[in-house]
Image (spheres, rainbow, N blue to C red):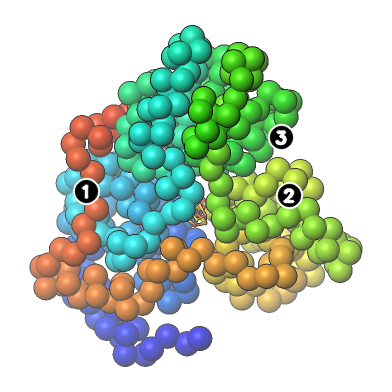
Amino acid sequence: PASDPDLVERARAAKAALGDQVFVLGHHYQRDEVIRFADVTGDSFKLAREAAARPEAPYIVFCGVHFMAESADILTAGHQAVVLPDLAAGCSMADMATFDQVEECWEVLEDMGIADDVVPVTYMNSSADIKAFVGRHGGVVCTSSNARRALDWAYAKGSKVLFLPDQHLGRNTAVLEMGLALDDCVVYNPHRPDGGLTPEQFRDARMLLWRGHCSVHGRFSKASVDDMRARVPDVNILVHPECKHEVVVEADRVGSTEYIIKTLDAAPAGSSWAIGTELNLVRRLAGAHPDKNVMFLDRAVCFCSTMNRIDLPHLVWSLESLARGEVVNRIQVDEETAHYAKVALDQMLALP
Ligand code: 13P
Ligand code: SF4
């Protein structure tokens, strides 16, 4: 639906009034009505790198979800006020690993006598205190665009990896990019005693996967791929690595949101693409490539409801508040957590 023209004008006016004082970052899953006001758009990795790109701007408006805004606050060392236009824009995957659960898991690894062999790696999609935990224990943050490099780094340090919180990104990267066997990966369930694993499983596993997932990407299945290939025989299946292994193994290409965009940009006219990721992005790609047949991989629609919480009214409210000098919805990570989380984030940014 078309955006309310009054709100569009108000957003434009507030942003113009703020000028260089505000830097607006937008993740690729944001709504069209929001992304058009972003100074920089990107995947999680690009946005982490860009967060500190405008140190002269006192305000960063982060159009994305909570863990991304936290990471921007950490990477700008609290020198800029990071604003999340709606505080309810969380991430259900990030919520699947709490600090207490991860501490308890580490105690289990210590009891099993293997903690010294384990390097923790956390997906960007995790809270700041999980990133700090990983920083304290010699690990690294990764995103969907550098998971392979992060795991190479981790396996050069230790024989096992604890991968938080997305089991699918961990498994897909380990098995499809690094050649580990599916049996090398076991799933640690934080809701079961000892993670639901036997001492032998802890001993033999090379990859301990946290039992977390993205419910948006979890909708795609092998049946969605089969159905699409039956309907469009020459289709290219392009999916995000948060999809289940059964989907990724059937896909033609796999990568982050930025990779998905670049792949479509480079695709020849007339080619067909079924995309397994969030719907705002897929619809935008379909609009941007009228000469290609761009489809959503599943028949059911699939927005990320928390990404969608950032809408034009919330953006207008944050920008107008800032233009009055009122900082609303600031995301601020406490100093100690930020210090250790930054160790793990800096390690990611330093990966070769
Ligand atoms: P990327 O943009 O890094 O591919 O991540 C997708 C995602 O789910 C962000 O929440
Ligand atoms: Fe979290 Fe999935 Fe939404 Fe990304 S798409 S923010 S992983 S719920």
Please indicate, yes or no, whether residue 157 appears anywhere in the rendered image. no
Label 3 SS: helix
> Is 90 left or right of 246, judged from the image as shown?
left
Precedes in sequence: disc 3 or disc 2: 3
Residue lying at the far left in this picture: please name it. Answer: 325
Label 2 SS: helix
Q: What residue is at 32 percent from the left and 85 percent from the top?
A: 7
Q: Residues within 10 Å of mark 1 (few under 14, many from 20)?
A: some
Structural distance between the alpha carbons of marks 3 and 2: 12 Å
- Residue 331 in percent (x, y) is at 24, 53
The correct choice, above or below, for 151 with respect to 126 in the image is above
Q: Residue 176 carries which label?
A: 3
Structural distance between the alpha carbons of marks 2 and 1: 37 Å
Task: Choose between 294 and 29: the one closer to the eye.
Answer: 29
> Is 24 left or right of 228, judged from the image as shown?
left
Q: Mark 1 points at which residue?
A: 332
Q: Hey, what amino acid is under mark 2?
A: Val
Q: Name the residue under label 2.
A: 247
- Residue 253 in percent (x, y) is at 72, 49
